[in-house]
Amino acid sequence: MSALAMNETLTIARLGQRGDGVAETVQGQVFVPFALPGESVRAVRDGDRAQVVEILTPSASRIAAICPLFTRCGGCAAQHMGEGLYAEWKRQQVVTALSRAGLETEVLPVVDAHGVGRRRVTFHARREDDGMRVGFMVAGTHDLIEVQACPVLAPGLERAPIVAQHLANRLRASNKPLDIQLTASEAGLDVDIRGHGPAGDALRRQLTEAAERLDLARLAMHGEIIVERRAPFQLMGKAAVTPAPGGFLQATSEGEAMLSRLVLDAIPKAKRVADLFAGCGPFSVRLAEKAQVSAFESDKAAIQALSRAANHTQGLKPVAAEARDLFRRPLLEHELNVFDAVVLDPPRAGAEAQVKRLAASKVPLVAYVSCDVGSFARDAALLVAGGYALERVTPVDQFRYSAHIELVGVFRKTAGRK
C-alpha cells in the first residue's frame, strides 16, 4: 500500500466482473477483493483498490472456502460465494456483455460443467538458493506459493505437485524459470515443459529416465516429444484423440461433453457441417456421428490429431480436416454456403474476420462456442446485423471458483435476409 492508503468502512453494492466487491463512494468506485454484496467491511484503501481488514456485517451468501490457500493463491476468486450468488454473478457477466452490445436474447441459467475437476494444470518453477521452488502464483504477484494439493483438479492430477517438483529438480541446472503443464489423460499424465530451451542428448536421457520413474504417459519439452511411453488419449464421443503436447483442451471432461451436447442440440438436422477453429476435434468427432464434417484449424498438429482419430474411429461419417488460418484466410461466402450449419469455437480474441464472412453467407444455423463474453458480444452483433437472430445463450461453467465463463450462442438466419 502507498503512503496515501486509508483505513475506512465500505459498503459493498455488487460484484465486479472479476469477482471483487464494488463499493460506491464519493470519490468513485472502489474494488474490494473477497467482499460480497450487502457486506460492510473495514478496509485499507489505496486509490480505487482496497484490502479487507475486517468484515463488519457478513453476507448471508458468504460460505467457508474449501482450500486453505484461498485469497493467497491466485487460482481462485470465488470460493467464498454461496451457490446462488455465484451462479447469478457468472450469468450476469453474459447478460451485461450482450446488453452493452445492444443485443437481447434469452440467457439461460448457468450450467455447472465442473464434473470431477480440471484435467490440466500448470505449475511454475523458479530457482531459489540451491533448490527449485514449485507452485502457483500468489494473487496479484509473480511470487510462488507451494501447493501440496488443489481441490479443483481432477483425480488424475493427484500426483501433479510431486511430479512437477521432481521434474523441476532435474532441470535446476538451467537456472531458468519453467512452466510445467500436466494433463490427466486416459493413459496417465501427459507433461509438457516450457522455458528451458532445447534439450541436449544427456538431458533427454535424464528426462526419459524420469518419465520411466514417474510412470508418465508422455513427456515433452516445448511441444517436442522426449518420450511417449503410452499414447495420452482423451475420449471424445466414440473417438480416442491424442492431442499434441500442450495442445488446447477444454478445462474439464464434463465441460467438453456439455459444450458438445449444446452444439449438437442446436443443429439437430444438419447433414453437412463446418467446424471452424476445430482444435483436435472435440466437436468434429461427435458431429461426425450424424453429419459430414469439414474441420478447419490453424494448428497443424491439432489437425493431424483430429485426422488420426477420425480415421481410426468406426461409425463416423467423413471428416475432412484442413490446416487453415481463419484469421488471415477466413472461409468466404461461397465456401460457407454449402453447409447446413457452422460451428465455431475461436480463441479469446473471437473471430471477427470470419464472422463478417459468415454474416454475409446463407448458412441457416450457427452454433458459436465462446470463452470470452466481450468478443462473443462483438461478433454476435455482427451476425445479427447480417440477418441472424440470436435465439439463446447458455452459459457453461467449467472453471469453478474463477471469474471465467464459457457459453454457447445459437443463431438462425432470418427469413428475407439470405
Image (spheres, helix red, strand yellow):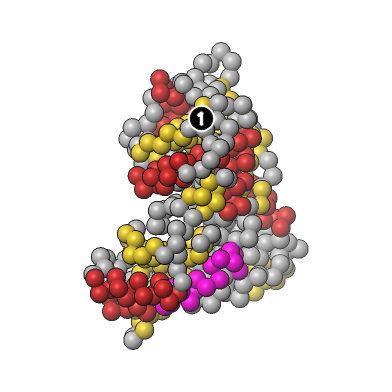
- Which residue occupies 42% across, 47% down? 305
Magenta stretch prevailing secondary structure: helix
162 magenta-colored: yes
- Which residue occupies 60% across, 61% down? 117
Task: Give the magenta part as a residue range.
Answer: 151-166
Judged from this view, the residue extending furthest toward the bottom is 130
Mark 1 nearby-residue class (10 Å; few <14, some 14–19, many ≥20): many
* 126 relative to 255 in the view: left or right: left
Task: Out of 152 and 232, give the one closest to the viewer.
Answer: 232
User: x and y percent of residue 255 in the render?
Assistant: 59, 50
- Asked which quadrant contains residue 265, the reply is top right
Judged from this view, the residue extending furthest toward the top is 416
User: x and y percent of residue 243 in the render?
Assistant: 44, 52
Residue designated by label 1: 292
Judged from this view, the residue extending furthest toward the left is 200
Q: Secondary structure at mark 1?
A: strand
User: x and y percent of residue 199 in the render?
Assistant: 26, 68
